[in-house]
Image (spheres, grey):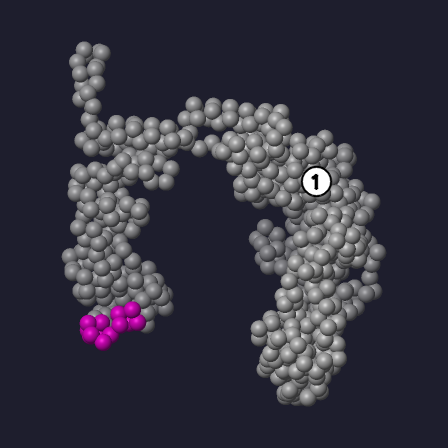
Amino acid sequence: MAILGNIRKQTTILILIIGLALFAFVISGIFSSGSMGGGGAKVGSAIGEINDNEVPVDVFRQKVESLSRRMGPTTSTMQAVNQVWDQEVRNSILGAQFEDLGVDIEKDQIMNYIKTNPGYSQNPQFLNEDGNFDEFKFKQFIADLKINSPDQYRLWLQDEASIIQSAKEQTYFNLIKAGVGSSLKEGELDYKLANEKLDIKYVRVPFTSIPDSTINVTKSEISSYISAHKDDYKQDPARDLQFVFFNEKPSDSDVKNVEDSVIKLLNETVEYNQQTDKTDTIAGFSTTTDMAAFLDRHSDVKFDTIYKAKKQLPTKFADTLMGLKVGQVFGPYKDGDAYKISRMMGRKANGSVKASHILIAYKGAQRANPEVTRTKEEAEVEAKRLLKEAKKKDVVFVELARDNSDGPSAANGGDLGYFQEGTMVPKFNDFAFSSSVGTIGMVETDFGFHIIKVDDKEDIVQIATLVREIEASEETLNKLFTDATQFESDSKNSDKAFSDLAKEKNFIVRPVNKIKAMDENLPGLSSQRAIVQWAFNEDTELGEIKRFEVDNGYAVVQLTATYAKGLMTVEDASASVLPKIRKERKAAQIVGANKGKSMDDFAKDNNVTASTATAVTVKSPTIPGAGSEPLVVGTAYAMNEGDTSGLIEGETGIFMVMLNKKQEAAKLDNYSTYANNLKSAAAAKVNSDVYNALKEGAEIEDNRSVFY
């Protein structure tokens, strides 16, 4: 604790951060002698083990359930599972570090923090008669919460644990950051690397000059490369699948039936009425006089009585619908997953107005800003002045409104958008709808004086639309089930390959490669945790086939490959290893054939020309025509002007470089800014780099896929 004491002496900010995060721990500890779990649940099977510390599955499930409730229905169970697991791993790994270093909390910090935190110190619930924070009242609140609201108290304890962990992490990482620094010399070097510019002449023989086909690589060479680069070719357990998806979508017959049903409702029909022993004429969509009742009975969407402008209608059919006369019908037409017929019920010419205004408010006007102090008379004088100004040809109304209006639309140049009859206050409404486009005038309302400009007008229409959703019929769904079941049976019993059999039946086979044990979503099937669990089940054999019921249908799935934890096989790694080995071979060939040559001979013998690059820096090592070449530029940086390098193996080829000119960076009086930037950049990586290093060295057994 002596180390922590020294840190606190050096920075008041750190004290406040740690105090803010840790106060809850001591408060609940005052009233609780039990564990954070609040119930001492029995430990069942472990969902995992982190450095010999088991994570009980029942406790884990409680945390997942709690997190799921907090995050809401948009979060899947697996997302909650993964988040809780990541936190368990982090808590366990860093917890061991906290224990070794003695990172803990001091109780005397807690109340001091609470007394200075407005959230508590100014909360009337915790104040005494003098208006000061009452420590006893706060403690009593926690005690009452524990006795009278157990559920809320348990949530408090969970929050408390998270707060404590975060605060301890802050302390721990701050200890490490205290040892991160950068000298002025390092700052000076960083400045030079960014600002000293190089002009170079170079010759590049690209690796592409040697065809890949001339480089033969054996399996044993690939295997040797993998063994020499083990860290780059580690793999987690994974599976490859392929599947045929039987989608619950309407058949052509279903679509035709919906279209026919819509057509049938279009015109009036004659039906026999058994009760009256007479035939009745039933009004159709095109003739009904009670559209609301008709659509209630026959449509999947009720009658929308609101008048709409053209831009509010379906884009694809807007022109046609706007062109209808009152009473005229359009359709049936297919719009998305529905068949529709539409009927023009009413039209209002110029029924929607677009206007802008400048509001000049006065003291006492409705909703006037308290900062407005002008009288009504002064406001009227100002409004008349602005009206005169607005009518001038060279004046931009938008700018005038932006600079002078007291209304909330001032920021938009006074633009009020489109509005229909009755939306605005009467005088404003009457002026807007009675005036022609381009008219500018003034009206007075309870809000003040308005200088109004009518910007545009458009017709609005009331359209009734009968909608019938296109859905798969029961007959189609039954056939889909039969097809999926039959394909599952055939693929299991046939000697033909899964993909060949699917092709014969005109089914599409979709592969999914390298899925992990905790994956949830499969491309083309979305969330399908059951399929992933099946693929990783020890009893599922390679090549096995199974049918699954999924969202909107069925999937017949085959397990096509398994990958064990460890090094990648030659087959799996060859796609990434081959280019690297070929590059090494090509580099060796080019270097071997050109050793000791001058730059001119190097260019001539390889049928390439010398090029130049100017103002190149070590921190921006891009060479025109070659791309990023840090080793090449770094080599040139270390050379003297006029010197020529040997052969350099770059990213895209073999180079030879001559340094034509090095432009020194202007010297600075002090390089502390650059040193501080280096220090800040290093400190910013401490949290992630340290944790990742600790995690890499930890022994973690993950059994989540067994339980979820």
Quick check: can you spot residue 217?
A: yes
Q: Residue at x 17, y 41 (%)?
A: 326
Q: Is residue 438 above or below residue 519?
A: below
Residue type marked 1: Thr
Q: Nearer the viewer, residue 586 or 330?
A: 586
Residue range of the region highlighted in magenta in the rendering: 388-401
Q: Is residue 449 left or right of residue 561?
A: left
Q: Is residue 556 above or below residue 129?
A: above
Quick check: can you spot residue 109?
A: no
Q: Residue at x 32, y 69 (%)?
A: 402
Q: Nearer the viewer, residue 221 or 668?
A: 221
Quarter containing the C terminus: top right
The residue indicated by pointer 1 is: 562
Give percent across and percent down for residue 185: 74, 81
Give percent across and percent down for residue 529: 62, 37
Q: Residue at x 81, y 65 (%)?
A: 3
Give percent across and percent down for residue 649: 71, 71
Q: Is residue 677 left or right of residue 251?
A: right
Q: Specify the quadrant of the image occupied by residue 340.
A: top left
